Image (cartoon, rainbow, N blue to C red):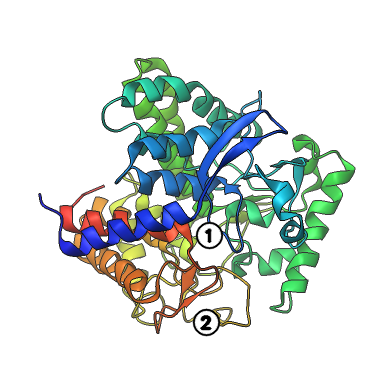
Amino acid sequence: MTPSPRLCAMTEAVRALYDRNRQRGDAPWCGLAYDFVCPSMGTYPFQWFWDSCFHAIVLSRFDVDRARTEVRSLLANAQPDGFIAHVTFWQRERFETLLSTYSIAYRTPYLSDCIQPPLLAEAVAAAATGPGGDAFLAEVLPRVRRYYEWLHDVRDPDGDGLIATLQPDESGLDHTPKYDRYLGIERCALADFTAAWERVAGPYETVGRDHDAMFALDRFVVEDVLVNTVYAENARVLSELLRRAGDPTGALAWRQRAQATTAGLVEKCHDPSDGLFYDLAGAREEPLRVNTVSSLLPILLPDLPQAMVEGLVSHLVSPAEYAARFPVPSVAMDEPSYLAPSDESTLVYRGPTWLNTNWYISRGLRRHARADLARSIEHGSALLVEREGFREYYDPTTGQGFGARDFSWSGLALDMLARLEEGHAT
């Protein structure tokens, strides 16, 4: 199939963006070379975990060798226990002033001590396509598997199949209103969120950030719907990668873990009264009943019961909630906490449309035979980039871009536009 002029133009725009945001060099602190696409040179010049996974997926569309290099850089400082930091500060000495504005928990001066949504297996699967894919998979799969084993062993202490985040930024949804009540947030101001983060992370330092002790403190323990949807999907993809690599026993184990996570989401997070999924907070697993985009994310799961799919679709097509002119807003528009973006606010995930969640939702819609809705999201996502450029997020009503400029994961518009033209079902 010959790509359309629209797809060709998007490919060249993304290629140019990824060249501008490419970071290469040698890091004296670990004696390793690095080569990755940073999220944005102006605000995020380091290697972020889930951004880098998105970048590898996009790169696989036009430069699979660079996709593999992106993954290698992400895995280069994987710890012996399997942990992979949510930020690697390869070249931190160049950006000390910028670093002073971050709220980050450090494992070392060059590695954060946090996780992000675990889409590493999806990134590896994308990078392992084409010639040389099997050799690349054999090279990286042991570290990829150790990472997911670490999540399973360390982040699911109650064994219900749902992994837990221990501070709000681990979900990647830093200022989402679904955490407000749990964090004691009363004002929508950055200082209040920073103080709340300190109330959580400060006590962790007193226990040496030991995981058992952090769970026991019960300061912020959230079985997050978005994080666990991504975990379930990647457990399934890891199973396929292990089967491809000739490990049927490992493949079966991870297929069963994917099923267990889906079952946990369905049995513990789904609310039949409104058809939405809600995070569980604290040792008592209290639902965080705020209607945000993460409540819709389980539509991605291929084995989600059809009745639940239909319930989620009903919210997606509701003009009062998510059927904005430029969907999908990150908070339902009829939620009291919904906040339209502005140049004055730096708070994220309180209303604007983000292309990473659009990418997941559109894929889920295709899986569940709603390609009509998927096409609308895919077209709208590409249109946002074509009109406003690669911005961090967009106003769901006007389409105006906000946040960081030259934001690399908005390159996911390329993958969505390709799926739109190719008619992909997954």
Q: What element carries label 1?
A: loop
Q: In which image quadrant can residue 287 be found? A: bottom right
Q: Which callout, 1 or 2, points to the residue nearer the camera?
A: 2
Can I make out residue 195 in this image?
yes
The answer to whether 116 is drawn above or below residue 186 in the figure is: above
Q: In this view, does 61 lie to the left or right of 338?
A: left
Is tag 1's residue or tag 2's residue first in the polypeptide sequence?
A: 1
Q: Residue at x 78, y 42 (%)?
A: 214
Coordinates of residue 332 in the picture (x, y in percent): 47, 75
- The one nearer the camera, 372 or 130, is 130
Q: Which amino acid does label 1 sit on?
A: Tyr
Q: What residue type is labelled 2?
A: Ala
Q: Which residue is drawn at 39% across and 24% down?
A: 137
Q: Is residue 272 left or right of residue 307?
A: right
- Toward the front, the furthest residue is 25
Query: What residue did someone put label 2 on?
Result: 340
Coordinates of residue 291 in the picture (x, y in percent): 50, 69
| Label number found at residue 278 | 1
Q: Is mark 2 on a helix, strand or loop?
A: loop
Q: Which residue is drawn at 73% across and 52% down?
A: 104
Other residues around mark 1 within 10 Å, as few (<14) / some (14–19) / many (≥20): many
Q: Which residue is drawn at 42% across and 61% down?
A: 410
